[in-house]
């Protein structure tokens, strides 16, 4: 509980001596810096701190979240920018005094920003209970899978999956907390499985389309329900189940399901080659990188996300499918 | 030290300080008396900001002339800590009860603890203060206890998120050394009986440690929670290795990590300390860990490449070999686990296996080598790096 909330009009905290000194150096000119985005803060800080130590600079993190390397030797700044680029983290090399206006704007914005409030306490307690008891329509979605063909969208399948973010507190939705996201997704897949076992299929299902349904990460396949009437239905397995492919493939075949996969990312596209991942669709979160380089087997790839014009164009060019309404 | 009233903005810092104090007290055996004022648990009619402020104003003068130190928790609770005998804490407690009147709820809002004996209870209180304890359902009054407090899941049931958070907290101060052991990776050439040690790997008895943390709790159905605990364990080892005295005598070594570990503070600290010694570290990832979090794996691989660490696909079972692309996902080494079944492969099976092995055999380590048969199987395939019980025996004899 907040006892004495800082009032919004409280003045900005005084600048530290180190920041003031770095700003003075930037104003004097002849030094460089780097501006990095707000992703992967720890890694970015580590790389920038290294450059700051080598080039006598300072790392400044305004409340907006991005990271600035200030007042450092040009060589050290260029090396840090190169390292960030190799890590595929967006970064911009700064040259002072040329980029002073940019820095001044960020300083002014930071001074005007609301005082940082402590993050709301995480509330993971009761996660399992919420996954079981919250209304299905808040946690589960029926997504649509389709592809552009001859300028027209063609429906391919429907994908019944969970929305882990609907279950998690804000602070646990970031990439750094992948384990909680995975746990939440697993709990929701268990709920989907239980519904399927009870013969409950999602409202809004189109009889002519194959249904893809998320499966939980379980080493041994559970008793599987028979699929609803129709052709081409598939169980969507997390990639982590690949080492358990044999028992799962056997159980799915016996119950009348095909296989699909979820959780693909650029680093693992080699798996899409040959028959390492038997089955149909390979679902992945739509990212610019995957859309630009969809790997050796784009026809099996389905990128989940909002269908932006860029994504549509790339889907038409490379032939990967799109899925919206539910993530992968 | 005089008592002072830090603004609640200090609560995060205070929480850390309090945790450190509890650990130090356990480590050094120095006694402390603790009074936990659970303001967050006050009955609703007394739980308003102005009540809390009044309570603080009444309590502070009592503490100021003493050596007590006051800590804020993020949930609004206060913790006063003092060296014994700490009669003034009793005064504070009496005052608090007087202020709150006859409400039986009030008695439960003052909890006395002794350090180091009750450090676990204090850490649990701190954890509660961070909001990690399960929130009370609306129908439960503040006095009732949950049926299964965090850290103790119902017997035979998989752990819940809060149980794992509690287990993580328990893991933080635990001594892992009994669960850690070193095993060498050796170069052993055909015709040269002496194995030459190339690096040593630290292995953790994960099963034993998990059983100690969450006894009798099945983790098979909650793979992500299990990963979380494994990640914590790896972070403990990394923190240990980043200590200055360890870094000074850093020898070639290896460790299995989860991809996400490379993006966390403990690894980044070690990375900064290692400098030019980075090539001495071989980082292993298991196939399942790579598949479960490919985004983090991509970042980890790029970072390892940037910094010059060696990487390995570790503990790969022979039957998993066909699943792995020929480029080993871009990893340096393949650590293949020997299995007796390899000796029984027919000609087709042998050919398939040979085709799936990286053609550069110097990238392969055969692990789980318990018998001479395993070594000769490796030699037949041009493999000259081995790890296992037999190698350890030969090293100790040599």
Image (cartoon, rainbow, N blue to C red):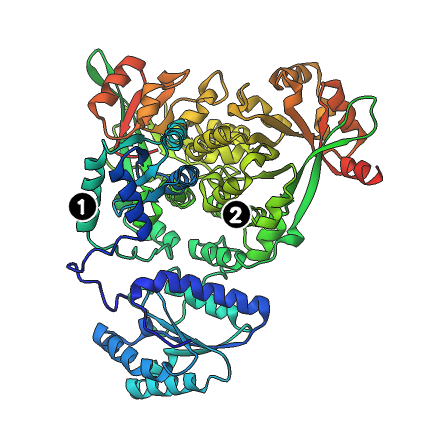
Q: Position of residue B342 (x, y in %)?
A: 71, 25
Whether residue B141 is visible here, answered yes or no, is no
Mark 1: few/some/many CA within 10 Å (<14, 14-19, 20+): few
Between label 1 and label 2, give the one nearer the viewer.
1
Q: Residue furthest top?
A: A150
The numbered mark at residue A108 is: 1
Chain ID, mark 2: B
Residue at image coords 63%, 42%: B250
Whether residue B2 is visible here, answered yes or no, is yes
Examine the rendered structure and indicate whether residue B160 appears above or below residue B100: above
Secondary structure under the numbered disc 1 in the rendered image: helix
Using residue B355 as the reference point, say whether residue A153 is left or right of it: left
Q: Nearer the viewer, residue B221 or A98?
A: A98
Examine the rendered structure and indicate whether residue B332 appears above or below residue B246: above
The reply to whether discs 1 and 2 touch (Cβ–Cβ < 8 Å) is no
Chain ID, mark 1: A
**What is the quadrant of the C terminus of chain A in the image?**
top left
Q: Position of residue A238 (x, y in %)?
A: 44, 33
Q: Position of residue B65 (x, y in %)?
A: 38, 83
Q: Position of residue B118 (x, y in %)?
A: 52, 72
Dividing the picture into quarters, in which one does residue B96 lie?
Answer: bottom left
**What is the quadrant of the N terminus of chain A in the image?**
bottom left
Using residue A130 as the reference point, say whether residue B272 is left or right of it: right
Examine the rendered structure and indicate whether residue B61 appears above or below residue B139: below
Residue at image coords 52%, 47%: B235
Q: Nearer the viewer, residue A245 or B394?
A: B394
Where is mark 2, residue-wise? Answer: B235
Dividing the picture into quarters, in which one does residue B174 lie?
Answer: bottom right
């Amino acid at each position: 509980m907040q006892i004495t909330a800082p009032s919004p009009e409280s003045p900005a905290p005084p600048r530290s001596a180190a920041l003031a000194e770095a700003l003075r150096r930037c104003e004097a000119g002849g030094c460089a810096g780097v501006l990095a985005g707000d992703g992967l803060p720890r890694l970015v800080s580590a790389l920038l701190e290294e450059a700051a130590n080598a080039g006598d600079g300072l790392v400044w993190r305004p409340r907006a979240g991005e990271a600035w390397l200030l007042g450092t030797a040009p060589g050290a700044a260029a090396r840090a920018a190169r390292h960030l680029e190799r890590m595929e983290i967006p970064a911009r090399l700064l040259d002072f005094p040329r980029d002073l206006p940019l820095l001044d704007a960020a300083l002014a914005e930071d001074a005007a920003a609301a005082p940082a409030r402590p993050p709301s306490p995480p509330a993971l307690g009761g996660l399992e209970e919420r996954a079981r008891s919250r209304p299905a329509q808040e946690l589960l979605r029926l997504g649509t899978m389709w592809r552009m063909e001859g300028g027209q969208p063609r429906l391919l399948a429907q994908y019944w999956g969970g929305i882990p973010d609907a279950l998690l507190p804000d602070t646990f939705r970031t990439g750094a907390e992948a384990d909680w996201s995975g746990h939440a997704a697993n709990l929701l897949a268990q709920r989907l499985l239980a519904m399927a076992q009870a013969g409950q299929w999602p409202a809004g299902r189109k009889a002519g389309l194959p249904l893809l349904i998320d499966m939980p990460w379980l080493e041994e396949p559970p008793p599987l329900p028979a699929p609803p009437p129709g052709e081409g239905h598939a169980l969507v397995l997390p990639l982590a189940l690949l080492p358990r492919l044999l028992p799962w493939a056997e159980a799915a075949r016996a119950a009348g399901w095909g296989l699909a996969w979820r959780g693909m990312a650029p680093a693992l596209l080699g798996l899409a080659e040959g028959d390492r991942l038997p089955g149909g669709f390979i679902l992945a979160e739509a990212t610019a990188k995957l859309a630009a380089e969809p790997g050796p087997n784009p026809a099996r790839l389905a990128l989940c996300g909002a269908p932006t014009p860029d994504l549509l164009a790339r889907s038409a060019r490379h032939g990967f499918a799109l899925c919206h309404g539910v993530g992968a | 030290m005089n008592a002072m009233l830090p603004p609640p903005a200090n609560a995060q810092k205070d929480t850390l300080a309090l945790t450190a104090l509890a650990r130090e007290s356990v480590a050094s055996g120095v006694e402390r008396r603790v009074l936990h004022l659970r303001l967050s648990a006050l009955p609703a009619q007394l739980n308003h900001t102005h009540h809390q402020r009044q309570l603080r104003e009444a309590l502070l003068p009592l503490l100021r002339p003493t050596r007590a130190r006051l800590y804020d928790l993020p949930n609004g609770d206060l913790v006063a800590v003092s060296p014994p005998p700490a009669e003034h804490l009793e005064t504070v407690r009496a005052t608090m009860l007087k202020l709150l009147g006859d409400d039986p709820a009030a008695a439960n809002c003052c909890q006395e603890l002794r350090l180091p004996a009750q450090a676990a209870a204090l850490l649990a209180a701190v954890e509660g203060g961070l909001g990690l304890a399960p929130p009370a359902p609306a129908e439960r009054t503040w006095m009732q206890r949950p049926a299964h407090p965090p850290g103790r899941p119902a017997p035979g049931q998989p752990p819940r998120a809060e149980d794992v958070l509690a287990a993580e907290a328990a893991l933080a101060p635990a001594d892992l050394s009994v669960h850690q052991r070193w095993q060498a990776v050796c170069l052993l050439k055909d015709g040269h009986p002496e194995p030459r040690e190339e690096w040593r790997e630290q292995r953790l008895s994960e099963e034993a440690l998990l059983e100690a943390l969450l006894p009798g709790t099945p983790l098979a159905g909650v793979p992500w929670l299990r990963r979380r605990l494994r990640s914590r364990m790896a972070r403990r080892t990394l923190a240990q290795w980043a200590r200055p005295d360890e870094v000074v005598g850093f020898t070639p070594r290896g460790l299995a990590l989860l991809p996400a570990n490379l993006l966390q503070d403990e690894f980044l600290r070690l990375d900064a300390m290692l400098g030019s010694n980075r090539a001495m570290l071989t980082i292993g990832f298991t196939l399942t860990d790579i598949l479960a979090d490919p985004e983090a794996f991509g970042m980890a691989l790029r970072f390892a490449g940037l910094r010059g660490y060696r990487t390995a696909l570790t503990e790969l079972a022979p039957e998993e070999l066909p699943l792995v692309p020929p480029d080993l996902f871009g990893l340096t080494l393949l650590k293949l686990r020997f299995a007796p079944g390899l000796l029984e492969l027919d000609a087709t099976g042998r050919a398939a296996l040979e085709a799936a092995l990286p053609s550069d055999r110097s990238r392969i380590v055969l692990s789980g080598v318990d018998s001479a048969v395993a070594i000769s199987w490796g030699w037949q395939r041009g493999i000259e790096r081995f790890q296992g019980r037999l190698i350890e025996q030969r090293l100790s004899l040599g």
